[in-house]
Image (cartoon, grey):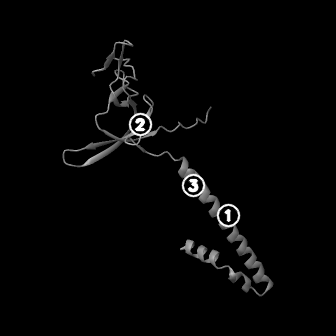
Amino acid sequence: MYEELIEKLLEDKSWIAYGTTETEHKIAKHIQQAINAIEDLITALTASNEVIAKNKPKWIPVTERLPESGVHVLVCCRVKWLSGGVRSYVCDAFYSAPKTEICSYDYDIEAEYDEETDEYYLPEGWWEVIKNWDDYSSVAIEDFVSHWMPLPEPPEREDE
């Protein structure tokens, strides 16, 4: 409603010239100043929205590209239910490219041994990060990972 009124005022400013008395001219001048201020505000908000949209983290399809191996990211996983439904969830995870992430724990998986480096590596795939479990620091994600995005920076602490 207000948007239409503002648009009409911005489109046709000829009504300002109709003031005949000094008071009407003053009122018309103040209304014109308000319109100019609104136009400036609209311009500033539009520019601000464009900056926010450009800097907003976006989900990246895994078919488009994968994150750097071992870097923690947010992932969107999809689970198909036996009933036919699909459920999505988000978790902290990392992608392990072949022979890049050394197995430093005794995982219950078939770690890949490399004789040349004498190291065991995590198999290629997605791994959910576990932060409060003594036995493992990550577990293989068996669900379908569709998208990922970089983790946001933590908030600044006010007491620092």
N-term-proximal mark, 3 vs 1: 1
Asked if marks 2 and 1 touch (Cβ < 8 Å), the reply is no
The label on residue 40 is: 1
* 11 relative to 112 in the view: left or right: right
* 7 relative to 105 in the view: left or right: right
> Mark 3: which amino acid?
Glu
Q: Residues within 10 Å of mark 2 (few under 14, many from 20)?
A: some
* 48 relative to 134 in the view: left or right: right
Q: Which of 159 and 104 is in front in this view?
A: 104
The label on residue 135 is: none
Alpha carbon distance from label 2 to label 1: 42 Å
> Mark 2: which amino acid?
Leu
> Mark 1: which amino acid?
Asp
Q: Which percent across, then down, holds residue 106?
A: 32, 17
Closer to viewer: mark 2 or mark 1: 2
Q: Which of 136 and 133 is in front in this view?
A: 136
Asked if marks 2 and 3 touch (Cβ < 8 Å), the reply is no
What residue do we see at 68% from left, 71% from top?
35
Residue that carries the numbered disc 3 in the rendered image: 50
Q: Identify the residue at the far right of this view.
A: 22
Q: Residues within 10 Å of mark 1 (few under 14, many from 20)?
A: few
Q: Quadrant of residue 155?
A: top right
Compared to residue 117, the image places residue 92 above or below, namely below
Q: Residues within 10 Å of mark 3 (few under 14, many from 20)?
A: few
Closer to viewer: mark 3 or mark 1: 3
Alpha carbon distance from label 3 to label 1: 16 Å
Provide the secondary structure element on which disc 1 rests.
helix
Closer to viewer: mark 2 or mark 3: 2
Residue that carries the numbered disc 2 in the rendered image: 66
N-term-proximal mark, 2 vs 1: 1
